[in-house]
Protein backbone atom coordinates (compact mmCIF):
# COMPACT_ATOMS: atom_id res chain seq x y z
CA UNK A 1 0.00 0.00 0.00
CA UNK A 2 2.74 2.37 0.87
CA UNK A 3 4.41 1.85 -2.49
CA UNK A 4 1.10 2.33 -4.27
CA UNK A 5 0.39 5.48 -2.28
CA UNK A 6 3.87 6.75 -3.07
CA UNK A 7 3.40 6.15 -6.81
CA UNK A 8 0.00 7.83 -6.71
CA UNK A 9 1.52 10.81 -4.93
CA UNK A 10 4.35 11.06 -7.47
CA UNK A 11 1.85 10.84 -10.30
CA UNK A 12 -0.26 13.59 -8.79
CA UNK A 13 2.78 15.80 -8.27
CA UNK A 14 3.86 15.21 -11.85
CA UNK A 15 0.42 16.12 -13.09
CA UNK A 16 0.46 19.34 -11.06
CA UNK A 17 3.92 20.24 -12.38
CA UNK A 18 2.72 19.70 -15.93
CA UNK A 19 -0.11 22.22 -15.55
CA UNK A 20 2.07 25.35 -16.10
CA UNK A 21 3.75 23.69 -19.09
CA UNK A 22 0.39 22.75 -20.57
CA UNK A 23 -0.92 26.26 -19.97
CA UNK A 24 2.19 27.73 -21.59
CA UNK A 25 1.84 25.45 -24.60
CA UNK A 26 -1.82 26.36 -24.89
CA UNK A 27 -0.99 30.07 -24.71
CA UNK A 28 1.60 29.71 -27.44
CA UNK A 29 -0.83 27.74 -29.59
CA UNK A 30 -3.43 30.53 -29.32
CA UNK A 31 -0.92 33.33 -29.93
CA UNK A 32 -1.76 35.84 -31.22
CA UNK A 33 -5.43 36.47 -30.51
CA UNK A 34 -5.21 40.27 -30.36
CA UNK A 35 -3.15 43.05 -32.01
CA UNK A 36 0.61 43.20 -31.46
CA UNK A 37 2.31 46.50 -30.63
CA UNK A 38 5.62 47.22 -32.35
CA UNK A 39 7.41 50.09 -30.63
CA UNK A 40 9.29 52.34 -33.05
CA UNK A 41 11.72 54.63 -31.18
CA UNK A 42 12.22 56.96 -34.17
CA UNK A 43 9.79 59.55 -35.61
CA UNK A 44 6.87 58.61 -37.84
CA UNK A 45 7.55 59.15 -41.54
CA UNK A 46 11.26 58.34 -41.37
CA UNK A 47 12.62 55.61 -43.59
CA UNK A 48 13.13 53.22 -40.70
CA UNK A 49 9.56 53.83 -39.52
CA UNK A 50 8.11 53.17 -42.98
CA UNK A 51 10.14 49.98 -43.40
CA UNK A 52 8.94 48.58 -40.08
CA UNK A 53 5.35 49.50 -40.92
CA UNK A 54 5.64 47.61 -44.21
CA UNK A 55 7.14 44.58 -42.46
CA UNK A 56 4.45 44.82 -39.78
CA UNK A 57 1.71 44.72 -42.42
CA UNK A 58 3.30 41.68 -44.03
CA UNK A 59 3.83 39.92 -40.68
CA UNK A 60 0.19 40.61 -39.73
CA UNK A 61 -0.99 38.55 -42.71
CA UNK A 62 0.98 35.59 -41.37
CA UNK A 63 0.09 36.06 -37.70
CA UNK A 64 -3.58 36.75 -38.34
CA UNK A 65 -3.60 39.86 -36.15
CA UNK A 66 -2.67 43.51 -36.81
CA UNK A 67 0.83 44.74 -35.97
CA UNK A 68 0.37 48.30 -34.70
CA UNK A 69 3.40 50.59 -34.86
CA UNK A 70 3.67 52.86 -31.82
CA UNK A 71 6.20 55.70 -32.13
CA UNK A 72 7.82 56.34 -28.74
CA UNK A 73 10.77 58.62 -29.36
CA UNK A 74 13.34 60.07 -26.99
CA UNK A 75 16.64 59.33 -25.26
CA UNK A 76 18.39 58.67 -28.59
CA UNK A 77 16.13 55.75 -29.41
CA UNK A 78 16.23 54.09 -25.98
CA UNK A 79 13.05 55.50 -24.38
CA UNK A 80 10.65 53.14 -26.15
CA UNK A 81 12.65 49.93 -25.58
CA UNK A 82 13.25 50.92 -21.94
CA UNK A 83 9.51 51.42 -21.37
CA UNK A 84 8.83 48.01 -22.88
CA UNK A 85 11.49 46.31 -20.75
CA UNK A 86 10.09 47.88 -17.60
CA UNK A 87 6.35 47.66 -18.17
CA UNK A 88 5.33 45.18 -20.87
CA UNK A 89 4.25 41.61 -20.15
CA UNK A 90 6.41 38.91 -21.79
CA UNK A 91 3.41 37.59 -23.70
CA UNK A 92 4.55 38.56 -27.21
CA UNK A 93 2.04 41.35 -27.63
CA UNK A 94 4.66 44.09 -27.21
CA UNK A 95 7.93 44.08 -29.14
CA UNK A 96 10.32 46.85 -30.09
CA UNK A 97 12.88 47.96 -32.61
CA UNK A 98 16.21 47.80 -30.78
CA UNK A 99 18.79 50.42 -31.82
CA UNK A 100 22.44 50.02 -30.88
CA UNK A 101 22.06 52.85 -28.36
CA UNK A 102 20.30 50.32 -26.09
CA UNK A 103 23.67 48.55 -25.75
CA UNK A 104 25.70 51.77 -25.48
CA UNK A 105 23.76 53.94 -23.02
CA UNK A 106 24.30 51.81 -19.90
CA UNK A 107 27.97 52.78 -20.08
CA UNK A 108 27.18 56.48 -20.52
CA UNK A 109 24.49 56.98 -17.90
CA UNK A 110 22.26 55.14 -15.47
CA UNK A 111 19.57 53.19 -17.33
CA UNK A 112 16.48 51.36 -16.03
CA UNK A 113 17.37 48.23 -17.99
CA UNK A 114 20.22 45.81 -18.61
CA UNK A 115 20.60 44.91 -22.31
CA UNK A 116 21.84 41.43 -21.43
CA UNK A 117 19.10 40.63 -18.91
CA UNK A 118 15.93 42.56 -19.71
CA UNK A 119 15.18 41.69 -23.35
CA UNK A 120 14.27 38.61 -25.35
CA UNK A 121 15.93 38.99 -28.75
CA UNK A 122 13.67 37.84 -31.58
CA UNK A 123 15.31 38.62 -34.91
CA UNK A 124 18.13 40.80 -36.24
CA UNK A 125 17.19 42.71 -39.36
CA UNK A 126 19.66 45.19 -40.77
CA UNK A 127 21.89 48.22 -40.39
CA UNK A 128 21.91 51.79 -41.67
CA UNK A 129 23.90 53.53 -44.36
CA UNK A 130 25.35 56.61 -42.69
CA UNK A 131 27.44 59.53 -43.88
CA UNK A 132 28.07 63.25 -43.68
CA UNK A 133 26.15 65.73 -45.80
CA UNK A 134 26.20 69.49 -46.42
CA UNK A 135 24.11 71.98 -48.35
CA UNK A 136 24.85 72.17 -52.03
CA UNK A 137 26.13 75.73 -51.61
CA UNK A 138 28.52 74.76 -48.79
CA UNK A 139 32.16 75.79 -49.24
CA UNK A 140 33.09 72.21 -48.30
CA UNK A 141 33.51 70.42 -51.60
CA UNK A 142 35.02 67.34 -49.97
CA UNK A 143 35.27 65.73 -46.55
CA UNK A 144 38.93 66.78 -46.48
CA UNK A 145 37.83 70.41 -46.84
CA UNK A 146 35.52 69.99 -43.87
CA UNK A 147 38.23 68.38 -41.72
CA UNK A 148 40.76 71.10 -42.55
CA UNK A 149 38.28 73.86 -41.72
CA UNK A 150 37.46 72.17 -38.40
CA UNK A 151 41.17 71.87 -37.61
CA UNK A 152 41.69 75.60 -38.26
CA UNK A 153 38.56 76.53 -36.28
CA UNK A 154 38.38 74.25 -33.20
CA UNK A 155 34.84 73.63 -31.98
CA UNK A 156 33.22 76.04 -34.47
CA UNK A 157 32.01 73.51 -37.02
CA UNK A 158 28.49 72.45 -36.08
CA UNK A 159 26.83 69.26 -37.23
CA UNK A 160 23.34 67.97 -36.61
CA UNK A 161 22.42 64.41 -35.63
CA UNK A 162 19.60 62.58 -33.81
CA UNK A 163 21.10 63.07 -30.36
CA UNK A 164 23.89 62.37 -27.92
CA UNK A 165 24.98 58.77 -27.77
CA UNK A 166 23.52 57.82 -31.14
CA UNK A 167 25.76 56.03 -33.62
CA UNK A 168 25.95 59.21 -35.67
CA UNK A 169 27.21 61.19 -32.69
CA UNK A 170 29.66 58.48 -31.57
CA UNK A 171 30.85 58.00 -35.14
CA UNK A 172 31.55 61.70 -35.58
CA UNK A 173 33.45 61.79 -32.30
CA UNK A 174 35.54 58.78 -33.30
CA UNK A 175 36.37 60.50 -36.59
CA UNK A 176 37.27 63.70 -34.74
CA UNK A 177 39.53 61.80 -32.35
CA UNK A 178 41.29 60.12 -35.25
CA UNK A 179 41.72 63.43 -37.11
CA UNK A 180 42.81 65.32 -33.99
CA UNK A 181 40.04 67.92 -34.27
CA UNK A 182 37.04 69.19 -32.33
CA UNK A 183 33.58 70.00 -33.66
CA UNK A 184 30.20 70.63 -32.02
CA UNK A 185 27.23 68.29 -32.10
CA UNK A 186 23.72 69.79 -32.22
CA UNK A 187 21.04 67.24 -31.25
CA UNK A 188 17.68 66.85 -32.99
CA UNK A 189 14.77 64.42 -32.64
CA UNK A 190 15.32 62.77 -36.00
CA UNK A 191 16.16 63.10 -39.67
CA UNK A 192 13.41 65.57 -40.72
CA UNK A 193 14.41 68.04 -37.98
CA UNK A 194 18.09 67.59 -38.76
CA UNK A 195 17.66 68.30 -42.46
CA UNK A 196 15.43 71.30 -41.76
CA UNK A 197 18.20 72.72 -39.58
CA UNK A 198 20.76 72.22 -42.34
CA UNK A 199 18.54 73.82 -44.96
CA UNK A 200 17.88 76.74 -42.62
CA UNK A 201 21.59 77.29 -42.04
CA UNK A 202 21.40 76.44 -38.34
CA UNK A 203 24.11 73.78 -38.66
CA UNK A 204 26.97 73.49 -41.15
CA UNK A 205 26.69 69.75 -41.76
CA UNK A 206 24.65 66.71 -40.84
CA UNK A 207 25.62 63.20 -39.82
CA UNK A 208 22.68 61.31 -41.21
CA UNK A 209 21.31 58.15 -42.78
CA UNK A 210 19.81 57.61 -46.20
CA UNK A 211 17.13 60.19 -45.49
CA UNK A 212 19.40 62.38 -47.56
CA UNK A 213 18.10 61.02 -50.88
CA UNK A 214 15.24 63.53 -51.39
CA UNK A 215 17.68 66.38 -50.71
CA UNK A 216 20.42 64.95 -52.91
CA UNK A 217 17.96 64.21 -55.72
CA UNK A 218 16.58 67.75 -55.45
CA UNK A 219 20.10 69.18 -55.70
CA UNK A 220 19.91 70.94 -52.34
CA UNK A 221 22.49 68.76 -50.56
CA UNK A 222 25.50 66.59 -51.27
CA UNK A 223 27.11 63.75 -49.36
CA UNK A 224 30.81 64.13 -48.63
CA UNK A 225 31.59 60.67 -47.23
CA UNK A 226 29.75 57.45 -46.41
CA UNK A 227 30.46 55.13 -43.50
CA UNK A 228 29.85 51.77 -45.19
CA UNK A 229 32.36 49.12 -46.19
CA UNK A 230 32.05 49.97 -49.89
CA UNK A 231 30.86 52.87 -52.04
CA UNK A 232 27.18 53.17 -52.86
CA UNK A 233 26.11 52.69 -56.48
CA UNK A 234 23.89 55.78 -56.29
CA UNK A 235 26.84 57.87 -55.01
CA UNK A 236 29.69 56.55 -57.15
CA UNK A 237 31.90 59.59 -56.54
CA UNK A 238 31.46 59.66 -52.77
CA UNK A 239 34.32 57.94 -50.89
CA UNK A 240 34.07 55.76 -47.80
CA UNK A 241 35.79 56.61 -44.54
CA UNK A 242 38.26 53.81 -45.13
CA UNK A 243 39.27 55.28 -48.47
CA UNK A 244 40.07 58.54 -46.70
CA UNK A 245 42.25 56.85 -44.11
CA UNK A 246 39.73 56.39 -41.28
CA UNK A 247 39.58 52.70 -40.24
CA UNK A 248 35.86 52.74 -39.49
CA UNK A 249 32.63 51.18 -40.70
CA UNK A 250 29.56 52.44 -38.83
CA UNK A 251 26.20 50.88 -39.71
CA UNK A 252 24.41 50.76 -36.33
CA UNK A 253 22.86 47.25 -36.55
CA UNK A 254 19.31 46.72 -35.29
CA UNK A 255 16.63 44.11 -34.77
CA UNK A 256 13.47 43.29 -32.81
CA UNK A 257 13.11 42.16 -29.20
CA UNK A 258 10.51 41.74 -26.51
CA UNK A 259 10.66 41.86 -22.71
CA UNK A 260 12.64 39.22 -20.84
CA UNK A 261 11.02 35.86 -20.14
CA UNK A 262 9.11 35.31 -23.36
CA UNK A 263 7.90 31.81 -24.24
CA UNK A 264 10.29 30.37 -26.88
CA UNK A 265 7.32 29.12 -28.89
CA UNK A 266 5.91 32.64 -29.13
CA UNK A 267 9.35 34.02 -29.98
CA UNK A 268 9.53 31.51 -32.84
CA UNK A 269 6.14 32.59 -34.20
CA UNK A 270 7.21 36.23 -34.20
CA UNK A 271 10.61 35.40 -35.68
CA UNK A 272 9.15 33.29 -38.47
CA UNK A 273 6.56 35.93 -39.37
CA UNK A 274 9.09 38.78 -39.56
CA UNK A 275 11.61 36.67 -41.42
CA UNK A 276 9.04 36.16 -44.15
CA UNK A 277 8.01 39.83 -43.89
CA UNK A 278 11.55 40.85 -44.82
CA UNK A 279 10.91 39.38 -48.29
CA UNK A 280 7.60 41.20 -48.80
CA UNK A 281 7.78 43.25 -52.05
CA UNK A 282 6.64 46.52 -50.43
CA UNK A 283 9.07 46.08 -47.52
CA UNK A 284 11.91 45.23 -49.90
CA UNK A 285 11.19 48.32 -52.01
CA UNK A 286 11.47 50.58 -48.95
CA UNK A 287 14.56 48.71 -47.78
CA UNK A 288 16.22 49.32 -51.15
CA UNK A 289 15.11 52.97 -51.24
CA UNK A 290 16.83 53.69 -47.93
CA UNK A 291 19.81 51.37 -48.41
CA UNK A 292 19.18 49.11 -45.42
CA UNK A 293 21.45 46.11 -45.87
CA UNK A 294 20.03 42.66 -45.08
CA UNK A 295 21.73 41.36 -41.93
CA UNK A 296 19.42 38.61 -40.79
CA UNK A 297 20.10 36.62 -37.61
CA UNK A 298 17.77 34.32 -35.70
CA UNK A 299 17.09 34.95 -32.02
CA UNK A 300 19.91 32.77 -30.75
CA UNK A 301 22.55 34.31 -33.02
CA UNK A 302 21.21 37.79 -32.33
CA UNK A 303 21.58 37.21 -28.59
CA UNK A 304 25.22 36.18 -29.06
CA UNK A 305 25.76 39.25 -31.26
CA UNK A 306 24.30 41.48 -28.53
CA UNK A 307 26.90 40.20 -26.06
CA UNK A 308 29.64 41.12 -28.52
CA UNK A 309 28.12 44.55 -29.17
CA UNK A 310 27.78 45.36 -25.47
CA UNK A 311 31.48 44.67 -24.94
CA UNK A 312 32.46 46.63 -28.06
CA UNK A 313 30.35 49.65 -27.09
CA UNK A 314 31.86 49.69 -23.61
CA UNK A 315 35.34 49.91 -25.11
CA UNK A 316 34.35 52.70 -27.52
CA UNK A 317 32.66 54.80 -24.84
CA UNK A 318 35.59 54.42 -22.48
CA UNK A 319 38.09 55.31 -25.22
CA UNK A 320 36.17 58.52 -26.04
CA UNK A 321 36.02 59.54 -22.38
CA UNK A 322 32.20 59.43 -22.37
CA UNK A 323 31.77 56.75 -19.72
CA UNK A 324 29.56 57.58 -16.75
CA UNK A 325 31.22 58.35 -13.46
CA UNK A 326 31.15 55.52 -10.93
Image (cartoon, grey):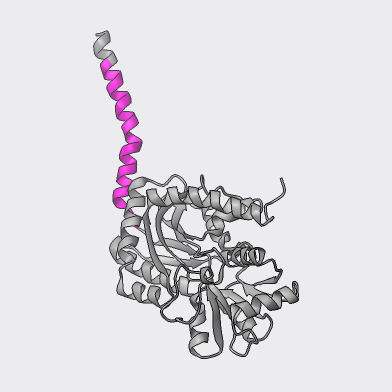
Query: Which residues, given as a range, are shown in magenta?
Result: 7-33
Q: Position of residue 136 (x, y in %)?
A: 58, 89
Q: Taking 307 as reference, is 204 above or below it? A: below
Q: Taking 196 as reference, is 155 above or below it? A: above
Q: Position of residue 226 (x, y in %)?
A: 51, 73
**The image quarter in which residue 137 lies:** bottom right
**Residue 23 among those drawn in magenta:** yes
Q: Taking 24 as reference, is 283 above or below it? A: below
28 or 77, which lies in front? Answer: 77
**Residue 179 among those drawn in magenta:** no
Q: Residue at x 70, y 78 (%)?
A: 149
**Horizontal side of residue 234 vs 182, given as left or right:** left
Q: Residue at x 34, y 61 (%)?
A: 274
Q: Residue at x 49, y 52 (%)?
A: 88
26 or 122, which lies in front? Answer: 122
Q: Is residue 111 visible?
A: no
Q: Is residue 18 visible?
A: yes
Q: Position of residue 42 (x, y in %)?
A: 53, 68
Q: Taking 70 as reference, is 114 above or below it? A: above
Q: Position of residue 317 (x, y in %)?
A: 63, 55
Q: Residue at x 64, y 64 (%)?
A: 178
122 or 164, which lies in front? Answer: 164
25 or 56, which lies in front? Answer: 56
Amino acid sequence: MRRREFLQAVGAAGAMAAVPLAASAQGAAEFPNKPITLIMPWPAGTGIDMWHRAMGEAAAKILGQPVVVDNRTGASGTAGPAQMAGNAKPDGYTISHIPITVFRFPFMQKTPYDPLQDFTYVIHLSGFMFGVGVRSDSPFKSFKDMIEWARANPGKLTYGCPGAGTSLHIGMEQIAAKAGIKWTMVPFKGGPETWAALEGGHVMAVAEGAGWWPHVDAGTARVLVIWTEQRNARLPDTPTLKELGYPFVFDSPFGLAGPKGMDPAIVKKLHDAFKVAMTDPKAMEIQKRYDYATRYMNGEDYTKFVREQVNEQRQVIEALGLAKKS
